[in-house]
Amino acid sequence: MTQSKEDIQRTFQNHKIIASESKSWYIGTPGTTQHSFSVTWSPGSILLYGQAGNVTLIATEFSSYENAKKWLGSCEINDFKRTIAHEIPENLAYLHEACRFWGNEPHYK
C-alpha cells in the first residue's frame, strides 16, 4: 500500500504526544552481551529485544507492571503466543523463557 505524503500528513494531523508510564531495562551477564536482551513495559504492552530477536506482546493483562510480571512469570507457551502482536518468531521458546525469567526475577521493582 502506497500513500501519498498528503494522506500520511492527514492521518497524523491530530496526533499529540501523550505522556505514558513505562519501564525499560537490560538483562544480561556482566562483561558480555551474549544472550542479553532489553525489556520495555508500558501499559498494555511489552517489547523484548536483543540478539535473539524481537517480540512485541500486547494483552490486557499488561495493564500494570505488577500484573505483567505476574502473568509472564507463570504463562504457558500457548498463552504467550496469543499475546504476540506480529509473526511468531522462530525462537519462540527462547523468548518465552526469557520473559518467564523476567517475570520471576525479584530484583527489579
Image (tube, rainbow, N blue to C red):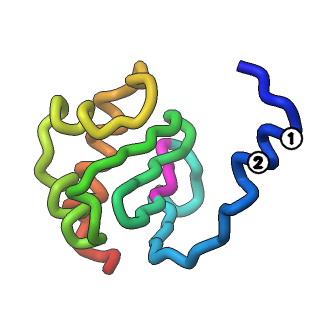
Q: Residue at x 49, y 67 (%)?
A: 25
Quadrant of image for the C terminus: bottom left
Residue placed most toward the observer, 30 or 108 = 108
Mark 2 element type: helix
Q: On the image, numbered disc 1 is attached to which residue?
A: 6
Q: Which residues are magenta?
A: 35-39
Where is residue 105 drawn, in percent x and y? 25, 65
- Depicted 14 relative to depicted 54: above or below: below
Query: Residue 92 colored magenta?
Result: no
Is 11 on the left-hand or right-hand side of 87? right
Location of mark 2 (residue): 10
**Disc 1 residue type (three-letter):** Glu
Q: Is residue 6 above or below residue 100?
A: above
Tell me the residue at 78%/41% (across/down). Answer: 8
Which residue is at 58% across, 49% downward?
33
Q: Kindly report the secondary structure that dominates the magenta region of the rendered protein.
A: strand
Separation of disc 2 and disc 1 at Cα?
Answer: 6 Å
Residue 75 x, y percent position in the rendering: 14, 45
Mark 1, residues whose alpha carbon is within 10 Å: few (<14), some, or many (≥20)?
A: few
Give the x, y percent position of residue 35. 47, 43
| Farthest-out residue, right | 5
The quadrant holding residue 91 is top left
In this rendering, position of residue 12 left or right of residue 72: right
Q: Residue at x 79, y 38 (%)?
A: 7
How would you rate the neighbour count of disc 2 (Cα within 10 Å): few for under 14, some for 14-19, many for 20 or more?
A: few
Instruction: Determine whether, in the image, residue 30 is placed left or right of residue 14.
Output: left
